[in-house]
Image (cartoon, grey):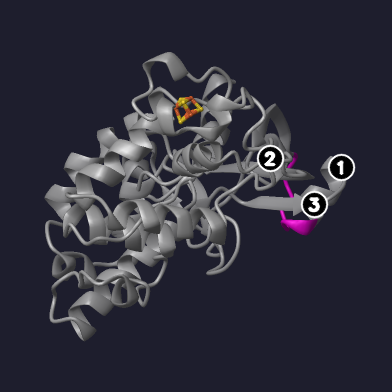
Amino acid sequence: MSQQTQIERVAQRWPKMMTEFPTPKSMAICDEQDVLALWQGLGYYRRAKYLKQAAEMIVDTFDGEVPYEVDLLLQLPGVGRYTAGAVASIAFNKRVPIVDGNVHRVVCRLENKRDTAAPCNWSWEHATELVLHSKTPSVFNEGLMELGATICTPKSPSCELCPLSSECKAYAENTQHEVPPPKTAPKRKQLHHYAVVLRCNGKFAFEQRGDQGLWAGMWQVPTLESTRKLKKAQIAEALQIENDLVLAGSFEHTLTHRIIDFTVYTCEVVKDDRFRWHTSDTLDALPLASAQRKVLAVHCAT
Ligand code: SF4
């Protein structure tokens, strides 16, 4: 849950997640929509789908017990090198490395390695060497990540406080501010989403997104996506809405690889079987990405 998501947000959801799904089996037998509903606001919703699939595999293949070897953990959907290393070393104290951005920075500075911006085979190999010499891998890995997060920070490392300063080649050569090199910012695609809040007798229309791609499996008000700006008539025609669309507002939603201009319309219609209709009281249980919560907030503000 905490990959790519601020830990404060995860902390808010964690108790409910553990109450609803205390074991892999409880998640394996639930409806995927229940997991997505609890994941709302955490972003990267594919992780929720993978978590559910991993729970099913743990039950079907590993007798309901989370495996503790990295090669077995790597078989689980959505589990990569980092997560496998984290589970194996922190939960099971296996002598295996974890390399996140913080650890990568620390090991690059220790060796004054100046040519790799992000975790790579070199940093994994170096972190493996280090953890092999540790007494308690779980404490060692946590310590290395914490050192990177609090002392060996990207812009102003506190080398005078660092317990590794006598071993650090970047510190010795005063290159710590140049190592590792900065990452190039991802290029973001500009998109336009036209969201229409259809209302009928106090209910709102929702549709489910497809199984693949952005916000897979989540729900949304009828939304038209485009790479260019569209006129109101084009939106109404594409969404097959005959009544007049009324502009409610707009906002920009930024994701890692996309900047999405949301334009929100509202429209009073007769009930239409293409959609699922909800009152505002039942929306909490509906898996909606945070962009769609913003759409509803724009609509409510009008
Ligand atoms: S001495 Fe400075 S650059 Fe080297 S590991 Fe410690 S904080 Fe990082």
Q: Which of 241 and 260 is in front in this view?
A: 260
Seen at 25% across and 60% down, the residue is: 95
* Residue 125 horizontal side relative to residue 249, left or right: left
**136 w.r.t. 294: above or below:** below
| Quarter holding residue 73 | bottom left
Q: Is residue 218 visible?
A: no
Q: Name the residue under label 3.
A: 226
Q: Name the residue under label 2.
A: 183
Disc nearer the start of the sequence (3/2)? 2
| Extent of the magenta region | 238-244
First in residue order: circle 1 vs circle 2 = 2
- What residue is rendered at 22% in x and 85% in y? 61
Residue depicted at 56% across the width and 48% down the height:
221
Q: Marks 1/3: CA distance?
A: 7 Å
- Relative vertical location of residue 282 with respect to residue 84 in this rendering, above or below: above
Residue 266 highlighted magenta (yes or no): no
Q: Is mark 2 on a helix, strand or loop?
A: loop
Q: Mark 1 points at which residue?
A: 229
Judge the density around disc 2: few (<14), some (14-19), many (≥20) Cα neighbours within 10 Å: few
Residue at (41% x, 27% y) in the render: 166
| Tag 1 and tag 3, C-beta contact below 8 Å | yes
